[in-house]
Image: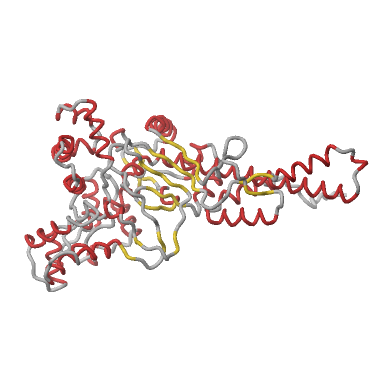
Amino acid sequence: MASKFSQIGTQVQTQTQTLTPQQLLVSQLTEMPVEALYERVDQEMKENIALERDSSDEWNDGGSEYDQSQDETRMDENDYTSIHEHVNDQTADYGSPDDIPDHLPGSQAIPEAVVGETLSFYDQLEEQIGFLHLDDHEKELIRYLIGSLDDDGLLRTSLRQIQDELEVYHNVNTSQAELEKMLRVLQTFEPAGVGAQSLQECLLIQVQRQADNATPIKQKLKRLLEKQFDALMLNRWDRIQRSMQLTDSEVKRLQHEIRRLNPRPGSSMGEAVGRNLQQITPDFIVENDPYGNLTMTLNSGHVPPLRVSNDDLSLLHAYEQRDPKTLTHAEREGASYLRERIDRAQSFIEALRQRQHTLTTTMQAIIRMQRPFFDSGDETLLRPMTLETVAKETGLHLSTVSRVSNSKWVQTAFGIYPLRWFFTSAARLDGEDVSVRSIKAALQEIIDAEDKRHPLTDEALTEALQQRHFDVARRTVTKYRVQMGIPVARMRK
């Protein structure tokens, strides 16, 4: 008799991770931007009688995110150097030391980000036309020049191309000499440096506009920008010092003066002005000081410092000191209620502390990795950086870094940016990781400067990028061009 065996069921063992209520609370608070956090804190204070505003100067245990309204973290050059070496060894995200332009300018007034219908940067420049005695033809020319500026306030389109555009598309007769004259007028506008045709010219205009431009140090600064600009871009201060016969103190002073200049004058006016509009509240504030150091501040907005109610703690202590047998039913219920509320308040305060630590740690790592941008405001200097890179550097979980990066904004000397903006993908070139944003920026510059009557094909664009040491394939150029919304050559005529 044959026997049969049938397997009715199988047992599968799986491992799942369940977040504790405290971990869930920390995750929720970490993901909240500062305005949402204020509403959450306000709600918690209304629901929990044991949680109250702390009127003292600091929280217990040495202060917190809510000490006053901000928590400042200073980052000097030594911090950056050590962390740069560590990350470079671990992730190979960085190029050569010459790619780290800590010397570049970058300190200026921090603009306020505004959302809504506002007066744009270009409108602000056009307003200044009204202060000049120009005829209608000259006003038309200078308005066209303003409209041709890039977002950073520089003019990268050639005057020859602008002349052709005016004559062909707008039936306006002009000459390069006349456009040159009106460009010089535009370069007298505020902010200083707007209308410059190169970074070098932008910085020179700013130095020339300074009231003390005739002092010896400013004369050396102008000579540095005029004669040693390439060495400056490579951060070769040893070469500069020998060539200009500078003392060590003069080098330090020139470095200080360079950092005071603004390579993106268009950004200093912000995208818009106005007050009766919805505004973005930054969660982080990164400031440059005159000596090249950065200070990162975690913005607490209107969130008050918190503590557990001393009255509730004293009352609970009194209950706990008594013999439980002497407590009435109502007193036992009261003690249980107080203990529950106090535990909840302490958990909430601890979750806020963990949020502060997590946000500060993450932002510090981003600043260290993207230090060249925070010094100069040049987005092409952003290095390849992923969530995994930051998680590895901070020791935080990948999901935690992702929560910090969502719905957070950072205010810099060059504008207000979403935190996600600093994460850039990488392309592998010559054994090194290069930011895709750098390649796209170079591609955009090449296309902007091309002869519109004979636009460059993808093959020609590939050759032009290779001349700039971006050894990319034609299919890669095509992919980036499509991603940037740029049509094929025949459609760009």
Rendering coords of residue 186 (x, y %): 17, 59
Q: Relative to residue 363, is residue 460 depicted above or below?
A: below
Rendering coords of residue 346 (x, y %): 68, 43
- At a point 79% along the width and 39% down the height, the residue shown is 317
Residue 133 shown left or right of residue 336 in the figure: left
Residue 149 shown left or right of residue 303 in the figure: left
Residue 234 shown left or right of residue 12 in the figure: left
- Residue 164 lies in quadrant: bottom left
Location of the C terminus (image quadrant): bottom left
Choose between 86 and 314: the one closer to the eye. 314
Rendering coords of residue 14 (x, y %): 70, 46
Residue 327 at least partly seen: yes
Q: Relative to residue 127, is residue 319 depicted above or below?
A: above
- At a point 44% along the width and 60% down the height, the residue shown is 279
Residue lying farthest to the bottom in this orientation? 171
Residue 18 at least partly seen: no
- Residue 433 lies in quadrant: top left
Q: Relative to residue 83, is residue 15 depicted above or below?
A: below
Q: How is the image coloured?
A: secondary structure
Rendering coords of residue 104 (x, y %): 28, 40
* Mark count: 0
Residue 374 shown left or right of residue 444 in the figure: right
- Residue 222 lies in quadrant: top left
Choose between 286 and 367: the one closer to the eye. 286
